[in-house]
Image (cartoon, rainbow, N blue to C red):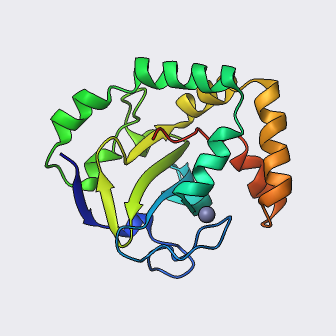
Amino acid sequence: MQREVDIPQFLFSSDTGAPHERCMVCNSYLLNEGFPYFIEKSVRQFPELGTSEIIFEYALCFSCSASFNAALSETSRQRMAEYFARYGRFEARREKLHDAPVDEWVAQCLIKDTPIAAAPEYQIVAQCAGKKLVVNDLPFAISLEAMDEIAALLSEETLGEMDDFMGKYFTGPPELAELLSKRPPVLL
Ligand SMILES: [Zn+2]
């Protein structure tokens, strides 16, 4: 059974202080009831200063996300699926966190089980439907350590294809395009 809750503040757009309204790629409006999309956010932390900065954050509709994932090579997709199946522990998490507040779903690295607060960098992936957050396999957080492992799974072929895809559809800043082309694909 999946649970739906209000979108928590840590997934709001930091520009507006409100939920993301548009798909980053196709500009679709996201907040109509039941409209499916993902939010992804990457944060760098400076524990010694007690501060953090957002590396990127965006919302991506299901259809654009599917196009991204389709741009992955077969090899990359397979490696990625095996990696998440082996280390993701989705079922155990669902049981353990069942009714827990959403903060707890992103408190530990999905893969390494280490505290996210201690990671120099982390990425959060969440699934939403309109104004609601869908709690099931997502949301999860991935620490820098796991992000590096995931990036290493992507083949040269995939990186080239992702670049092509971004060149064709993406109109934002090039730094963001580069980060996106290394994103872990969301499991649907
Ligand atoms: Zn879109």
The front one of 164 and 89 is 164
Residue drawn where x is 54% and y is 51% of the image:
45
Q: How far across and how far down the image is residue 84, in percent?
A: 46, 26
In the current view of this chain or complex, which residue is farthest to the left? 99
Residue shown at 45%/41% (left/top)? Answer: 188
Query: Residue 71 appears at what percent x and percent y?
Result: 72, 39
| Horizontal side, residue 117 vs residue 186: left or right | left
Using the rendered view, name the quadrant where residue 163 is placed. Answer: top right
Describe residue 70's horizontal placement relative to residue 8 as left or right.
right
Judged left or right of residue 160, residue 88 is left
Q: Residue at x 52, y 46 (%)?
A: 123
Q: How many marks?
A: 0
Q: Position of residue 141 (x, y in %)?
A: 43, 43
Q: Is residue 177 above or below residue 161?
A: below
Which quadrant of the rendered structure holds the N terminus? top left
Question: Ligand 1 sits in which quadrant?
Answer: bottom right
Work out whether 92 lies above or below 14. above
Question: Residue placed at 35% from the left, 73% from the top?
Answer: 131
> 82 or 176: which is nearer to us?
82
Quarter occupied by residue 91: top left
